[in-house]
Amino acid sequence: MNREEVKTIVREVLVEMLAPFTSLDRQEPKERWVDLKDAWEPLGYPSYGALYRAVQSGLLREGKEVCDRRKPGAMIARWQVNLVAARKRLLQHPAQRGEA
């Protein structure tokens, strides 16, 4: 296998792996908010619970990547996610995330 064949194979694998992330910029408006239950798969999480834990841990920040859209007086949060902002946050290196 020569160098060009390896480059072609690597390129194909990368395109396949990154497709869910790159398609968001082309298809989603910047302020597209979706319910948490519908956001875990486009963001590449293995389950709803994994994305929920990311919200609870503070990885995705309220008011920036996620928003609590519960009705006034409701006890249970109704989380929504800005797909483009969340994807951008998740692609940052952990050391660069900070709180800003």
Image (spheres, rainbow, N blue to C red):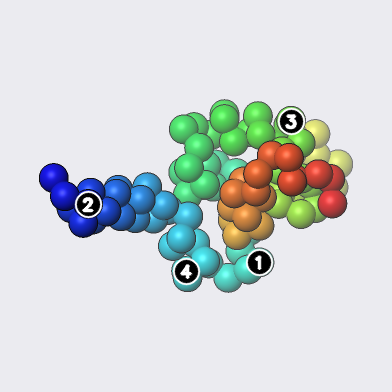
Q: Which residue is mark 3?
A: 57
Q: Quadrant of the N terminus?
A: top left
Q: Quadrant of residue 60?
A: top right
Q: Which residue is mark 2?
A: 3
Q: Residue at x 52, y 47 (%)?
A: 43
Q: Which residue occupies the foreground of this view, 11 or 48?
A: 11
Give x and y (percent) for residue 39. Answer: 54, 47
Kindly identify which residue carries mark 1: 31
**Mark before the other along the chain sequence, 1 or 3:** 1
Residue 64 at what x, y percent from top left? 76, 54
Question: Dot 2: what SS?
Answer: helix
Instruction: Measure how far apart labels 3 and 4 are at the Cα level.
Output: 28 Å
Residue 46 falls left or right of residue 84: left
User: Label 4 vs label 1: CA separation?
Assistant: 12 Å
Q: Which mark is residue 27?
A: 4
* Mark 4, other Cα within 10 Å: few <14 / some 14–19 / many ≥20: few
Q: Which amino acid, mark 3?
A: Ser
